[in-house]
Image (cartoon, rainbow, N blue to C red):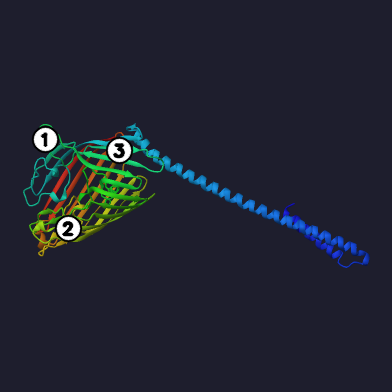
Amino acid sequence: MTGKSLKLALRTGLLTSTCLFAVPASAQDADVEQRLERLEALVMQLVERLDAKDGEMDAARAETVAATQQALAETRALQLRQEELAAQIDEPKKQEDKGFRVGNTTVSYAGYVKLDAISQRTSGGQVASGSIVRDFLIPGAIPVGGDGSGWDTDFNARQSRFIFKTATDVGAEHTLNSQIELDFMVTPDGDERVSNSYTPRLRQAFITYDNWLFGQAWTTFQNVGALPESLDFIGTTPGTIFARQPMIRYTDGGLMLAVEQPETTVTSSTGARVIAGDDSLPELVARYNFSGDWGSLSASGILRNLKISEDDFGTDGDSAMGYGVSLSGKLKLGERDDFRFMGTVGDGLGRYIGLNIVNDAALDLDGELDPIFTYSGFGAYRHMWSDKVRSNIAASYFKADNPVLLTSGAVTDESWNVLANIIYSPVEPVDIGIEYMYAERTLENGQSGNLQKIQVSTKYSF
């Protein structure tokens, strides 16, 4: 019997007894009444004790429930921490599989070796031997206005890449990593006569501490994950944001905030490019990444302060605001196919688009900067024919709103390209492919030139 049941029985019995002896038959019943009063007092004392006991039991229950909830919370927190530690340990472990450990630091490496065999022709002029325009597509350098060339063939392994990584154990509360990346593109000292010896160049070099990145990396404005798979170095170059530069970046989940290296490029009245080098404020970049079973999306924005000083053009100097927004992503189509895209629009974005197809700004008659408005984008579809064979088709476009009275008609008005390839992987680390590309460039004065390219590549990733 519970305390509550016992108390109810006692109270019921007391009430019954009171009713029975409420009216005594005679004076001799006084003793009975006194006994009844003593009985009532005893019952009330017992009820009070039971009430107190119930209070103690309720307090004990509440304390037990609170302790249980706290224990569950601590257990869950410990479980989450163990999962975080497992994730922190997993990446260095993956790196250790390709490297070695020195003290508290895991040293690892990655990269690839790639051979490119390229044959291309241009309709508007001959590209000189040894020019980087013969290595990969640079839209702003497609010859215009000259005589067409024949098919020029070059072999090179310059895109081969080496990535050196470290991960240092600094305790469970923090993560500390670094990366240095090298290749041999766009560097001097090589030749096609004897040795083809090219100088290594720095691509990326950064450290990461918890949510922070310090060093040179892909601009936060660019979503590298949206780039299509091409044999050409970039592929959809006219419609692609492309820049690597020093920065300080903070990442929290999908949010990325960065201050990055500034640089202003200006078109003079003759159409020539002038790199002022007078920037005083960093580029401000924000980006947010979304992902799910459907794929991934990135939305980014940039704010720039374009600047020149009095010694650049013999003027008093000037500054202007540049800005831009970009939406890009990779959407899954079926089990293995995907569609990749990027769209970018803004004022004063020149050096960020298509390997600086046009400049950030032009100089007006008063010596002031006039930012150049541009818009660009690309779309690419990848189809998996089988586990070992896949194809990509892609197209991109760029358009500039040049102030022609200030830049002359010799600057690029628009550029576009299309490409298609098929890639075979006999084993997982090896890709063998062939790609056809057509690209075109048109100037503000109406002159145009095109480039056709056939490329065969073999790449071994490690």
The label on residue 192 is: 1
Look at mark 3 in the image and give the residue it sits on: 165
The label on residue 307 is: 2
Tell me, yes or no, whether the two marked residues, 2 and 1, touch with CB atoms within 8 Å.
Answer: no
At which x and y percent is residue 36? 85, 61
Question: SS for tag 1?
Answer: loop
Nearer mark to the viewer, of 3 and 2? 2
Three-letter code for the amino acid on which mark 3 is drawn: Lys
Query: Is residue 271 left or right of 232 when viewed as pictured?
Result: left
Seen from the viewer's position, the closer of residues 451 and 32 is 32
Nearer mark to the viewer, of 2 and 1? 2
- Mark earlier in primary sequence (3, 1): 3
Residue under the image location 45 percent in, 41 percent down: 82
Three-letter code for the amino acid on which mark 2 is drawn: Lys
Query: Is residue 144 left or right of 249 when viewed as pictured?
Result: left
Seen from the viewer's position, the closer of residues 236 and 346 is 346
Q: How many marks?
A: 3
